[in-house]
Image (cartoon, rainbow, N blue to C red):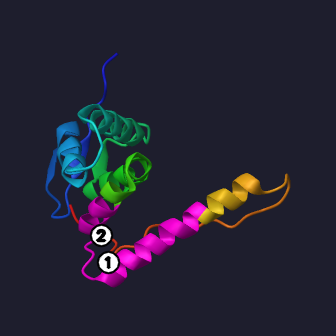
Amino acid sequence: METASLTVVKHSGATEPFSRKKIMNGVRKACQGRPVSVDDVALLASQVEESLRATGASQIAAHDIGLAILPPLRKLDEVAYLRFASVYSNFDSLNDFEREIGRLRAEDMAEQAAANATPGETVGKASPPVGKSPTGGE
């Protein structure tokens, strides 16, 4: 079965072919010094590529690739997630880190509450990731 080619639309408007290797390189940098194996990084890159292809789009914004990396990276390693998010979302102060850590804690608490909720009980969801700009880093 042949897979359709994906084209990445960069922030400048330039386009280039999708590269799983670029995802792996970015994630590997975020995971440097963390207990994350090369196989873990390769699996994450495959999951991200699969989720992007599942959209059916032939072109994908570079920003959307970064957004697709964040959830599986958080599951893999929260410290690496914060490193990646800080670059991707252009964190420039401790307040940015504190805000994101607070959001992660609220999300964890909401998940725990949902897991402990009785059937039929509704539990609120945490807000989406915050960034310095909607276009983030590349």
Q: Is residue 26 visible?
A: yes
Query: Image point 27% across, 49% down: which residue?
Result: 34
Q: Name which residue type carries label 2.
A: Ser
Q: Name which residue type carries label 1.
A: Lys
Give whichever of 57, 28 is nearer the camera. 28
Residue 97 covered by magenta stretch: yes
Seen in the picture, residue 27 relative to 41 is either above or below; the reply is: below
Q: If you read the primary sequence from the N terminus, does the residue marked by circle 2 or circle 1 appear first?
A: 2
Image x and y of residue 44, in percent: 34, 39
Q: Is residue 136 visible?
A: no
Query: Image point 37% across, 50% down: which residue?
Result: 77
Picture disc at residue 132:
1
Q: Main secondary structure of the magenta part?
A: helix
Image x and y of residue 18, in percent: 21, 41
Give whichever of 34, 40 is nearer the camera. 34
Label 1 packing within 10 angstroms: few (<14), some (14-19), many (20+): some
* Quarter that holds the N terminus: top left
Seen in the picture, residue 7 relative to 127 is either above or below; the reply is: above
Residue 121: which quarter of the image? bottom right
Picture disc at residue 114:
none
Label 2 packing within 10 angstroms: few (<14), some (14-19), many (20+): many
Residue 80: which quarter of the image? bottom left
For the residues bearing labels 2 and 1, Cβ distance under 8 angstroms? yes
Image x and y of residue 116, in percent: 75, 55
Could you tell whether 72 is left or right of 20 in the image?
A: right
Gap between marks 2 and 1 measured at Cα: 6 Å
Picture disc at residue 89:
2
Q: Magenta region: which residues?
A: 82-108
Query: Image point 36% across, 41% down: which residue?
Result: 48
